[in-house]
Amino acid sequence: MQPHKQNRKIMNIGFFFQRMNRWQNAIFFILILTPVIIGGCATLVEQQLIDKPLVTFEGMSLEAVSLSESTPVFRFQVTNPNPLVLKVRNIAYDLKINSKKFVRGVSDKSIRLRAAGSDMLGLSVPFNHMELLDATGASAHSSTVTYDLSGHIRIGPFAVPYQAKGELEIPNLPAITLKRVDVSKLAFNAASTGQFVLELENANSFPIQLNSLQYRISLNGNEHAGGIIRPVPILDKNSKTLLEIPLRITPSVSGWTMDHVLTAASLPYEFSGELRVSIPGANERVFYFQEEGKVPVEK
């Protein structure tokens, strides 16, 4: 009988440890799940007791604009209808240009939104113009592109969605044009000097520093000017500048008649070259140009 009693004691001890392990596992899962359940319930209760803030898009302005970069700042009015302060955590954004994906990200914020009040919130999205042209296929000569900005603003326990659409101005390259040919000082009996008059235009709201201008000008199929101008005067914002380039003509030039020059109202021309523009933080950038047509003759 004793061996039988000993076996029973061993079985009772094993059963005891099995029950202990089950209780330990149960307590372990309770300890893990309790914060999650309490946190989830707290969020649900918080969302039910607090009204969702309102987000209204107010507009966009450009800051830090240059030929290479722009920083549009999108402004939102955020209204807190609750009698307690809420914290703005971040702004998630997805920016499309000309209906094509361009850039997305999250801008961290740490702003206390006052109770029963409204505040302005800004989102800065700096970008490089060359990257914009490459990503969206926009023309380098375009002055505007369309934007579509969407995302959400994290305010307290809420993710408040928003969307804004409009047009975004992008800087223009300096425009260079052959305005006229001044032949008022040409003479029939000797080599004479006239003037090519060039116009440089900066249509942007910031000045542009040109490092150099390389050019080649042909009239009636014959090259009559070529060289480089260095330095070039600074182009003030929203301004135009005239440059005069010597035009030297001799009666022996092939295909050229002095009588034709002095009597013609306009002449066919070809004008090409390159502009080297100083870019802050990027040394300089080269822009090529080429045009043809008819240029007025000033006598």
Image (tube, grey):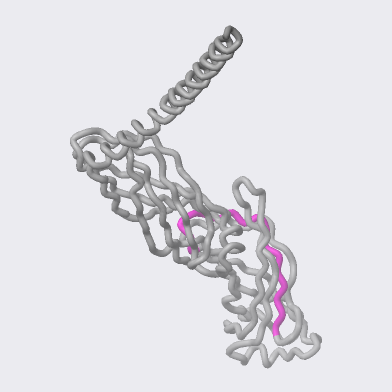
Q: Quadrant of residue 80?
A: top left
Q: Count every numbered label the image shows and give the total.
A: 0
**Taking 246 as reference, is 149 left or right?**
left
Q: Which residue is situated farthest in the top direction here?
A: 2
Residue 177 pos. (x, y %): 59, 73
Residue 168 pos. (x, y %): 44, 61
Q: Which residues are magenta?
A: 203-219
- Residue 299 visible, this angle: no
The residue drawn where x is 26% and y is 45% is 53
- The N terminus lies in which quarter of the figure? top right
Asked if the stretch drawn in magenta spans residue 213, the answer is: yes
Q: Nearer the viewer, residue 222 or 48?
A: 48
Q: Is residue 110 above or below residue 260?
A: above
The residue drawn where x is 51% and y is 65% is 240
**Taking 94 as reference, is 280 left or right?**
right
Q: Quadrant of residue 221?
A: bottom right
The residue drawn where x is 35% and y is 52% is 161
Residue 46 pos. (x, y %): 27, 37
- The C terminus lies in which quarter of the figure? bottom right
**Taking 294 as reference, is 55 left or right?**
left
Q: Is residue 237 above or below residue 188?
A: above
- Residue 159 visible, this angle: yes
Q: Nearer the viewer, residue 245 or 286?
A: 286
